[in-house]
Amino acid sequence: MSETKVICFANQKGGVGKTTSAVNIAACLARSGKNVLFIDSDPQGNATSGLGIHKKSIGVGTYDVVIGRAQISEAIIPTSQKGLYIVPAGIDLVGAEIELVDEPNREYRLKDAVKSVSGRYDYIIIDCPPSLGLLTINALTAARYVVIPVLCEYYSLEGLSQLTITISQIRRRYNPEIELLGVLINMFDGRLNLTIAVLEEIKKHFAGKIFRTPVPRSVKISEAPSHGMVITEYDRNGKGAAAYAAITSELMDRCTGNGG
Ligand code: ADP
Ligand code: MG
């Protein structure tokens, strides 16, 4: 097995499609035969429930791992997707940001955990909360790559410069390897002038980094998690499934293109 690729999905804005994209791309990777670990690092636990795990059934989760109460191997459980495993998140994870503040190595908790299981997986996907707090810093410190999902809305651009600055700071202080793998355009609607204008603006800042295929706005994409399904099961012949499949294959190419 080649080196484990650790990819986090980050954007301090909520509702841009971090969780949706992380879950569906992780599922596509598993479908193409990869062994994948998903780490839910958002206290909302949307990825956990979207992958069919009932919050009440969570025993050991991301909280226990980052706080140092459990080994990551104790927290890993299978999902309904063959080849896709998860470290689930419950609401207790909210406490981690505060509890870690005075702890040693507080930025490296996830990195150390990931290191202890890397080699067992082809890909480790980390879903971040909508903030630039300690959980996101842990994810950016643990990851080799970051994917930034964005909406084609006017306000999308505002947060991107702050996020770029944060990534540079992480690179300087905690993780010299972190690299922007790609910007994922979500809820794309090519009929809207605003979409086109915003996309042009994003291209100016992230030339060459935008995934070729945008994810369309699709009701099916938003319905799938309520059935504990991923888009390739819920609407396998739809445009959402096709987009995530295309992005996943581009993502794999970009990772191997880097010799990783
Ligand atoms: P984040 O994790 O960045 O907060 P989510 O992935 O939870 O964002 O997405 C926010 C909401 O938008 C969710 O209700 C999700 O189902 C919906 N959504 C995400 N992407 C799409 C899409 N391409 N089409 C339709 N709805 C989407
Ligand atoms: Mg989310």
Image (cartoon, rainbow, N blue to C red):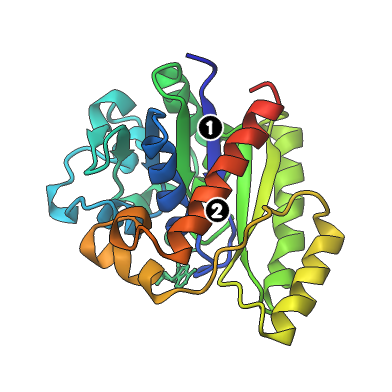
Give the number of the disc on residue 6.
1
Q: Name which residue type carries label 1.
A: Val
Q: Is mark 1 within 8 Å of ligand 2?
A: no
Residue found 51% across the figure and 29% down from its top = 111
Q: Quadrant of ligand 2?
A: bottom left
Name the spot of residue 251 as percent of width and height, x first.
60, 41
**Is 234 displayed left or right of 2 in the figure?**
left
Q: Residue furthest right?
A: 204
Within 10 Å of disc 1 (Cα), the crowding (few <14, some 14-19, many 20+) is many
The kind of residue tagged 2 is: Gly
State how far apart marks 2 and 1 are (Cα). 19 Å
Compared to residue 9, the image places residue 142 above or below, namely: above
Query: Do we see residue 40 in this rendering?
Result: no
Q: Where residue 3 appears, x then y in whole percent?
A: 54, 18
Which residue is denoted by mark 2 in the rendering?
Answer: 133
Q: In which quadrant of the rendered view does residue 222 lie?
A: bottom left
| Callout 2 touching callout 1 (CB < 8 Å) | no
Write the residue at 16% across / 40% down: 59
Describe the element under mark 1 as helix, strand or loop. strand
Which residue does the image show at 27% across and 32% down from the upper left?
A: 76
Which circle's residue, 2 or 1, is located before the other in the chain?
1
Image quadrant where one finds the C terminus = top right
Which residue is nearer to you in this view: 134 or 223?
A: 223
Is residue 212 visible in the rendered image? The answer is: yes
163 or 231: nearer the eye?
231
Observer-nearest of 165 and 221: 221
